[in-house]
Image: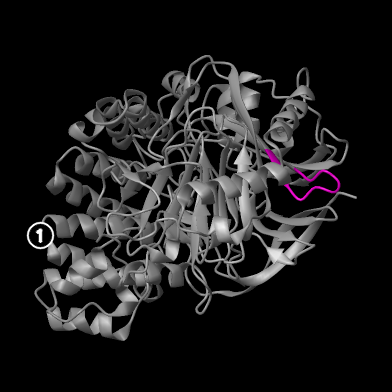
């Protein structure tokens, strides 16, 4: 009998903390950028996909950097989907992540289950955590919803058993999506139906990758002889698999020295799957309908940086992990285009695989692949996957089954857009009851044509940047709050000059000036005026003092000062940087990110011995970005000694 029930997962967890109150105006870094010559060497459709609709900013998503590394026992809401063969534990409040996929007959955990919840700065907007199976949509990288709540409910599955539905409105691309999970009675395979809708009258870029963490000591098999390799040295090049140029076996993650991605070049017409097998030939397999084209292996590598990241993301003494992934395009650098008023859907399946270890783990790559695919065909025929997808979509031909029992609530942003445009989205309701305080000012704009004034002592409410909201802001009464939000929407649209004009108009009559000064400072920095940016950042910090009350004041001051000190150091204003840093409360200056800032400040003041003392005392930067080399760079300015292992996060060869 298949059941869905609520549960509580208790484990050591670091609190997420408050979101950054500053709008995410900064242009995302070129982590996956390719030069013109590199693009010209790629297949034309791949090059087009890589160049399609790059993000100008992370707006309107908030930056999530309020977490730390102080883990304590905590209770996380969980949903458990279970039949007589599998038990699936899902975290609806954390992006709908599958935390555990337990196979009852063998007692095996099929995925890498992280024993802690430790956010780290791997998502596009910050907070992300490792382990299990995650659903990535929006744009290249880990989704902005990695640590955000999704709506969850039960609906009838095609076979009549209860199905767990997750859904939300993804704000980077302004698209709703759903993930349906069900376990047919007696099945060893979790079935996952995914649908992305475009309810708008304009095409939209679309992106999806399902990422599954598996124990590192596995052999990873996929039906390909070549792969597109992307490493931290950038670039994208085609390489043979599994043999590496140095003779290593790329199908075994623990053999890779450095971190990297291998996007398998699966041939057209063949079955799409990827598996991670233990030394006895058993493990996890993921397969899908043909729409989900790509397959990928990610490894951390055995180098000191990769090992340090593994320790950073989990608990000391736990085994390492790799990731097997599946996506809409051949690589994660690409986006597809979703036509107006249309949708994409596919079906994935996750379950145990038992292959003959002599063949599946042997040196003959063709024989290993053939054995894994033979075992998969016996366990779950390709036709059964296609039939399950057809049955799932047939039930939604006219109207999707409506949720029978609501189990968790996501954000109110979908409800706001449905209220604005009247979108009809059967099966994934976004009721007005989910509207909250963040959406209320925008609801007022819909009702009255004007934004309400900001609450006294509060930080600005979250922005809206979609074209329809920008149009409404254009015609709303031009008070400072409206000019602030209009400028953000214009910046997001790429009209930077007009955004600056809006912010300057708002500044002229604003009683609370710091949010507008911050936006103008970012504009100056992004447009190549560092001196003016430094002045405006410092002015914004001065204006913030006393303008915000309560805990929000500390959060805003920390976020703003961190950028302001950086801006002063960029133009050599060490005295101003020192004054801004020392104006922060002591408890803020004690945080790891600000200890790092102190090191930079001390080096700018030509005080390397004191900078070394900060390193020696020890500090941790919770929101250190993936691939960051700042700790190594700063250490090299202090002396010639090797970088201590605690600070070794460098990933490049």
Mark 1 residue element = loop
- Per the image, is 241 magenta? no
Is 460 above or below relative to 472? below
**How packed is label 1: few (under 14 Cα within 10 Å), some, or many (20 or more)?**
some
Q: Position of residue 268 (x, y in %)?
A: 49, 28
Find the magenta span and give its range: 182-192
- Per the image, is 190 magenta? yes
Q: Quadrant of the C terminus?
A: bottom left
Q: Position of residue 416 (x, y in %)?
A: 62, 30
Q: Residue at x 53, y 59 (%)?
A: 361
Main SS class of the magenta portion in the image = loop
| Residue under pointer 1 | 572
270 or 77: nearer the eye? 270
Residue 53 occupies which quadrant of the picture? top left
Q: Residue at x 65, y 71 (%)?
A: 11
Q: In the figure, is residue 628 to the left or right of 103? A: left
285 or 258: nearer the eye? 285
């Amino acid at each position: 009998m298949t059941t869905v029930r609520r549960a509580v997962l208790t484990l050591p967890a670091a609190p997420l903390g408050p979101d950054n109150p500053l709008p995410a105006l900064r242009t995302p870094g070129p982590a996956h950028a390719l030069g013109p010559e590199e693009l010209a060497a790629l297949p034309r459709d791949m090059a087009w996909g890589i160049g399609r609709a790059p993000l100008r900013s992370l707006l309107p998503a908030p930056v999530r950097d309020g977490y730390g590394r102080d883990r304590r026992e905590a209770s996380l809401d969980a949903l458990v989907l279970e039949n007589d063969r599998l038990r699936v534990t899902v975290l609806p409040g954390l992006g709908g992540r599958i935390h555990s996929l337990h196979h009852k007959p063998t007692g095996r955990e099929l995925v890498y289950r992280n024993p802690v919840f430790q956010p780290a700065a791997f998502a596009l907007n910050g907070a992300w955590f490792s382990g299990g199976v995650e659903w990535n949509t929006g744009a290249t990288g880990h989704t902005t919803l990695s640590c955000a709540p999704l709506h969850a409910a039960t609906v009838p599955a095609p076979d009549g058993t209860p199905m767990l539905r997750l859904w939300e409105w993804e704000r980077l691309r302004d698209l709703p999506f759903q993930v349906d999970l069900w376990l047919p009675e007696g099945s060893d395979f979790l079935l996952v139906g995914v649908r992305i809708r475009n309810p708008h009258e304009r095409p939209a870029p679309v992106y999806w990758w399902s990422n599954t963490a598996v124990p590192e000591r596995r052999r990873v098999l996929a039906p390909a002889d070549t792969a597109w390799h992307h490493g931290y040295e950038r670039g994208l090049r085609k390489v043979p698999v599994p043999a590496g140029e140095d003779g290593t076996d790329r199908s075994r993650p623990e053999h890779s020295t450095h971190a990297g991605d291998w996007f398998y070049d699966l041939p057209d017409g063949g079955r799409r799957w990827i598996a991670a097998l233990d030394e006895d030939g058993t493990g996890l397999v993921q397969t899908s309908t043909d729409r989900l084209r790509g397959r990928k292996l990610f490894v951390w590598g055995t180098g000191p940086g990769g090992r340090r990241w593994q320790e950073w993301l989990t608990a000391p003494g736990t085994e390492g992990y790799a990731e097997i992934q599946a996506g809409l395009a051949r690589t994660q650098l690409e986006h597809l285009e979703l036509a107006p008023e249309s949708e994409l859907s596919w079906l994935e399946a996750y379950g145990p695989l038992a292959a003959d270890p002599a063949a599946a783990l042997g040196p003959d790559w063709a024989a290993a692949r053939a054995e894994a695919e033979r075992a998969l065909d016996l366990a779950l025929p390709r036709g059964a996957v296609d039939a399950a997808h057809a049955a799932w979509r047939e039930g939604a031909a006219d109207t999707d089954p409506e949720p029978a029992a609501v189990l968790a609530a996501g954000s109110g942003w979908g409800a706001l857009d449905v209220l604005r445009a009247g979108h009809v989205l059967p099966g994934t309701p976004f009721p007005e009851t989910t509207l909250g305080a963040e959406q209320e000012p925008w609801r007022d704009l819909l009702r009255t044509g004007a934004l309400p004034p900001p609450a006294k002592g509060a930080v600005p409410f979250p922005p809206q940047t979609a074209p329809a909201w920008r149009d409404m802001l254009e015609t709303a009464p031009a008070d400072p709050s409206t000019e602030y939000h209009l400028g953000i929407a214009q910046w997001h649209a790429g009209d930077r000059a007009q955004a600056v004009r809006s912010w300057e108009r708002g500044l002229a009559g604003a009683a609370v000036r710091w949010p507008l000064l911050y936006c103008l400072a970012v504009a100056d920095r992004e447009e190549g005026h560092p001196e003016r940016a430094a002045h405006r950042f410092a002015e914004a910090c001065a204006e913030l003092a006393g303008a915000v009350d309560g805990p929000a004041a500390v959060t805003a001051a920390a976020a703003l000062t961190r950028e302001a000190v950086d801006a002063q150091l960029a133009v050599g204003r060490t005295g101003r940087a020192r004054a801004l840093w020392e104006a922060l409360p002591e408890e803020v200056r004690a945080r790891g990110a600000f200890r790092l800032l102190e090191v930079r400040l001390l080096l700018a003041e030509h005080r390397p011995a004191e900078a070394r003392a900060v390193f020696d005392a020890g500090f941790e930067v919770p929101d250190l970005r993936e691939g960051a080399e700042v700790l190594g760079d700063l250490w090299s300015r202090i002396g010639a000694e090797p970088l201590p292992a605690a600070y070794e996060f460098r990933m490049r060869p």
